[in-house]
Amino acid sequence: MRIDMIRYMLLLKFGGVYADLDYKLVRSLDEFRRFYAVVTREPETHSLQLFGPHWPIRPAASPAFLMSAPGHIFFRFVLKQLSKRKISEDILAFAGPEGLTITLEQYQIRYPLTNNPLAGVYVPPSFSFYPYENNSLDGVSKHFKDYRILKLGKSCSKLARWIDPRMYFLRKVKNLTQLCSDMTKFNAVTDSSPPVYAIHDMRKSGTSWGITHTPEYFANLTEMAKIVTNFRLGGSLL
């Protein structure tokens, strides 16, 4: 949770590009210099895992790759909302993808249309910044693969609940059932045509999900306390 907060604080103060270490840039980001803030999206399967069966796909914001001009009000809004939020043991729900999604939706309600470029936030297609290598879980660590399949399996199993009238319509959505047909494949079902700018290389992040980390995982690490000595998370001081 602290690293999720830190990235928002750094972007608010200094601006720039934040990317998790397991990202691989494959195309220049110059095209995005015209936007004052960019929040990328999680894959569509992650949206299904986080929010259950739904259609249209609810865009899930990704804290793994962010861009901003210094002082953008969106990241000030993010930190303000997080300071009010009760600290949760669920990392994803507090300041991770689920928490950032909720905050982005709240921000869009607060600023639905604006002529101020410093208030706008651009959300590109998920495929541009979060395709898996070959759009597959093949090659990732067993722990990460098992976790993803377990989470997606729980969401997909809800489609089979005949007693739930909401699932009757969703079972007829071909794109949605396609996401559940092979839970090891993460192909985008709504749009896979946009150019890809960065790939999330799960072979790298898999080390943090396994029990035994590789030596490279610990290389050049710095304790958070050495960077920020008085860090406030939510309503508590850590």
Image (cartoon, rainbow, N blue to C red):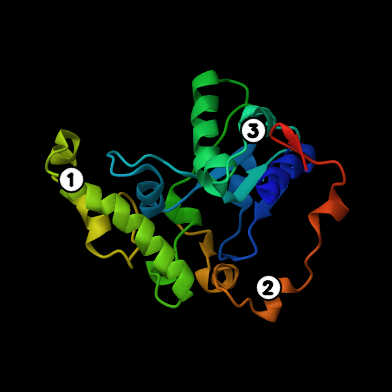
Q: Which residue is mark 3?
A: 82
SS for callout 3: helix
Q: Residues within 10 Å of mark 2 (few under 14, many from 20)?
A: some
Asked if 212 appears above or below 13 in the picture, the reply is below
The span from disc 3 to disc 2 (Cα, nearest Å) is: 28 Å
Q: Which residue is mark 1?
A: 173
Q: Is residue 178 left or right of residue 86?
A: left
Disc 3 marks which amino acid?
Answer: Leu
SS for callout 1: loop
Disc 2 marks which amino acid?
Answer: Tyr
Residue that appears at 41% across and 52% down:
46
Q: Residue 236 at what x, y percent from top left?
A: 74, 35
Who comes first in sequence, dot 1 or dot 3? Answer: 3
Q: Residue 170 lies in what quarter of the image?
A: top left
The span from disc 1 to disc 3 (Cα, nearest Å) is: 35 Å
Residue 35 seen from this side: no
Asked if 56 appears above or below 138 in the picture, the reply is above
Who comes first in sequence, dot 2 or dot 1? Answer: 1
Q: Residues within 10 Å of mark 3 (few under 14, many from 20)?
A: many
Residue that appears at 76% across and 74% down:
219
Residue 162 seen from this side: yes
Q: Nearer the viewer, residue 24 or 222?
A: 222
Q: Which residue is mark 2?
A: 217
Q: Residue 48 at what x, y percent from top left?
A: 35, 48
